[in-house]
Image: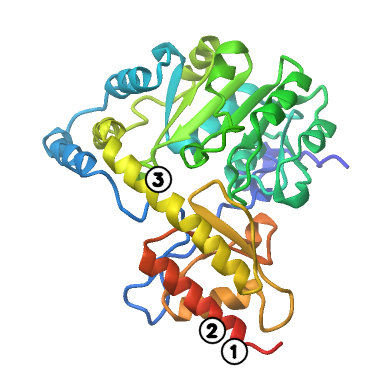
Amino acid sequence: MTDIVLDRSAAPRPTPKPGIMDIAPYVPGKSKVDGVEHPLKLSANENILGSSPDAREAFSTAFDKLQMYPDGRTTALREALAAKYGLEPERLLFGCGSDEIFQLLNQAFLEPGDNIVQGEFGFGAYAIGARACQAQVRMAPEPNYRVDVDELLKLVDARTRIVFVANPANPTGTWNSAAEIRRLHAALPPSVVLCLDGAYAEFCHDPAYEDGMSMVREFDNVVVTRTFSKLHGLAALRVGWAYMPEEMAGAIDRIRLPFNVNIPAQLAAVAALADDEFQQRSLALVDQWRPWLTQQLGGLGLEPLPSAANFVLVGFPTTPGKTAKEADAFLSARGLIVRYVAGYGLPNHLRITIGLEEHNRAVVEALQDFMKDQPA
């Protein structure tokens, strides 16, 4: 059924274009609990170690530059990333978080009636940007909570312009091998952009995993996005970047708003990128406690998914008294904030960010009490 197009010029007040008011706004996880003065927030996959001391020092040097416009080409960070990862500077694009880059991709490639394809549990920002362009969003089933190449390909047609794959994925933490991603790409028409969202790429160490950077060099239709929000702990500063074919970067740069990455963010990101010691400590923490948390949650009779990110998604029973929603409330009452992910189509799951040892033990102890005290 097609939407009825109204005469917006005859409306009594300005009217958004069709489809805008049908978009469900993004709802972030809670960060406060009534009656708890200092709750522990493990709901947003933030770096529990904070951020690099070098990044904080660099941030502080921006105080005397607040009257200035940022470098619109993000030159220092562009050169630092190119040097660290062996990338061509002209293939890099920067955004106010990865979210802006997804929006720019949609804006550059989607017309009304086009479509994007993503997994059913995919990040909400992909769909928001597509619907704002009056494009269709097609959600492929994710058997076993993993992106399925064949299910994605079933939804690709002549009006598909972008396929979004988060690898590792949020909120599931699951991942796809290099062989799977390359099989997906090989089956796509060359006119379709394959966007590989690598927000959690640094946390996946399996030899079968590929971050996609080499695919960008091999093909004209692959984009890899990354962020400084997770490993580097700069979520507040909103620094995202993408590696893509030079022609595509040039096209998107035409619609990118000027000065979209601010001076403190650029300075802190350059310093964070150079602080290998902080990055290694952050990775070591996740590598140590992610398997422990997974094992402990499984021992409570819950169903944690194998994760390659800095969080664990855990499934709860549907039995009244033991549900994920009730567990979320129970944890909140103890000052432990995790992410109830019903908004992602996962009403029986909670997503728990990896914390420090005392945080992870506190979550397990609380859930042990929850599973013991609630009626069967």
Tag 1 residue: 373
Residue 331 vertical placement versus 86 (above, below): below
Q: Specify few, some or many for label 2: CA neighbours under 10 Å numbering under 14, 14-19, or 20 or more.
A: few
Mark 3 or 1, nearer chain start: 3
The amino acid type, in three-letter code, at marker 1 is Asp
The amino acid type, in three-letter code, at marker 2 is Asp
Mark 2 in CB contact with mark 1 (< 8 angstroms): yes
Tag 3 residue: 283
Image quarter (top left, top right, bottom left or bottom right) of the C terminus = bottom right
Q: Residue 155's mark? A: none
> Alpha carbon of mark 2 to alpha carbon of mark 3: how far?
30 Å
- Whether residue 337 is visible: yes
| Side of 93 relative to 327 (left or right) | left
> Alpha carbon of mark 3 to alpha carbon of mark 1: how far?
35 Å
The amino acid type, in three-letter code, at marker 3 is Leu
List x then y, in percent, for residue 141.
79, 46
Residue 344 vertical placement versus 52 (above, below): below
Tag 2 residue: 369
Mark 3 in CB contact with mark 1 (< 8 angstroms): no
List x then y, in percent, for residue 257.
42, 26
- Whether residue 46 is visible: no
Q: Secondary structure at mark 2?
A: helix
Mark 2 in CB contact with mark 3 (< 8 angstroms): no
**Residue, x 46% and y 18% (percent of image)?**
253
